[in-house]
Amino acid sequence: MHNQSIASLLAQLHSRAISSRELTTHYLERIKRLDPQYNSFVTLTEDQALKQADAADSLLAQGNAHALCGLPIAHKDIFCTEGVRTSCGSKMLDNFIPPYNATIVENYLNAGVVMLGKTNMDEFAMGSSNETSYYGPVKNPWNVGCVPGGSSGGSAAAVAARLAPAATASDTGGSIRQPASLCGISGIKPTYGRISRWGMIAFASSLDQAGLMATSAEDLSLLLNTLTSFDAKDATCIDEPIPNYASTLSQPLKGLKIGVPVEYFGAGLHPQTEAAVKAALAQFESMGATLVEITLPHSALSVPAYYVIAPAECSANLSRFDGVRYGHRCKDPQDLEDLYRRSRTEGFGDEVKRRILVGSYALSAGYYDAYFTKAQQARRLIQEDFVAAFKQVDLILGPTCPGPAFAFGSKTKDPVAMYLEDIYTIATNLAGLPGMSIPCGLADGLPVGLQIIGNYFAEGLMLNAARQYQQATSFHTLAPANIA
Amino acid sequence: MDADQIEKLAKLARLNIAPDQVAEVADRISNVLRMVDQLQALDTTGVAPMSHPLDAVSRLRADVVTEPNVREAFMAIAPACEDGLYLVPKVID
């Protein structure tokens, strides 16, 4: 069952050829058997999942169930789940049981979707390798000596190992696309504001966006409509019409103009990654698309701009963790200052502390204009590059990451080396544009991701292009060995 | 970034840094700051800072009660509370 498309699973659920309980049990059994070697789940919600599956089966028997009813998925542990521990990969929230659901969790619950459990992640979504999780690193199912990427490494590894047909995820600087690339699966980060952030634990609020991971663009399209809803509880959620993403998947690509940024094929790109991405571009050309060389001249500034803006916003967002209202509290505080400082020092890991310190510095008196304002100005120039490019082209394609999955520990000593892992993904977050990663080949035997960047609210076109590519090729069907 | 600056920053951020870690933290943060210093070479004359990708402004809503009272649910997950109040160490003698 775990090698079938979501479309096929849904058809069988609705025709009653399989029950949600059977399907859910199948995945729970796989998680219990295989996940000890990957560590992709931090919480398995078995009892709750089986209850939800039985409820879904009753609805399916009545014949008028939601299209997604009975399908099991996993949620990244950044999304609040009522009554189920939501840790965000941090000791700070190891004891946090939210009294409410994130809007996207509620959307899937209302559709009858079953939650298998919560997936591991870099602490507070700060990392590109999953090595900063309080619960230990996730292992890449393609090679357990390699990282799965991050921060949504648990969701990516779970989908890659076929422990869940799909998983929710979030992307602040590449946290959906980079792990999707490293684990050989498909992932989408929609336009900033397209998906509600309510109940998604905040890292950098002007960049954070919820999204999805699955094994194909078709699967993503079937789940995306339920992820998307206008939500008045998120002041940045945008009230735009929501197209039926699955309905435009089969449009031909003839006449499509694809921009290929010269800056995304420079030094530092693994030769086999470059070869796989170029072969994918040729494939799009053979399907009727036209390739147009474009330039995004401020690309080199996206990593520095991001590492001012994201830490600045994180230092403000994470000031809420003070040991008073919820989360970790130190023992025997001497005074209020000691309570704050010791609770935070004990609760946060090294990378989170580092980013809070950098952010505090960038926002402090005397440095605000030189760092924060300057970075926000660079951000506008980066966005204007994309606005100009989208006057000439419909989509922008390039590599998702500079290379395939890397060994544990190889980039942990130097934060800047780790930050460069997101060199091709960060600019889309700064601009607020939607981005995807889909598998397009192998480098050193490990998956390579093709990044698809769309104009604002062009998720339908991106999924359409990805689906046409996946109908003509089979890279998305490649799976790690040893997951039978 | 020297030890004094790190201690000042840590105070602002309400964090403690163990004395034997100050040098390493200073070193790593200096690396990050050197990287972001690339921004200083950029000419940004006349460029408006961008705080929202779509330059959207906050929506206003009618001034009516829309949320139920969830006080008890939120107090129930607090580390220490009494009579509906959060408990912290004594602030005023």
Image (tube, helix red, strand yellow):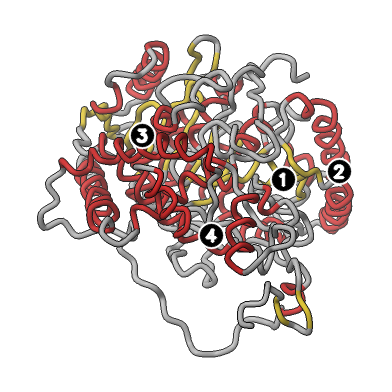
Of circles 1 and 2, the one toward us is: 1
| Pick the front one: A389 or A64 | A389
The three-letter amino acid code for the residue at tag 4 is Arg
Residue B46 placement, left or right of B40: left
Residue A246, can we see it? no
Q: Pick whichever of labels 2 and 4 is earlier in the sequence.
A: 2
- Graded by Cα atoms within 10 Å as few (under 14), some (14 to 19) or many (20 or more), the crowding at tag 3 reads some
Find residue A19 and name its label: 2
| Pick the front one: A228 or B82 | B82
Residue A364 placement, left or right of A338: left
Find residue B31 and name its label: 3
> How many labels, in total?
4
Q: Are marks 3 and 2 on the same chain?
A: no
**How far is the residue under mark 2 from the one under mark 4?**
32 Å
- Graded by Cα atoms within 10 Å as few (under 14), some (14 to 19) or many (20 or more), the crowding at tag 1 reads many
Tell me the element at label 4: loop
Give how far across and how far down residue A91 sits, in percent.
68, 48
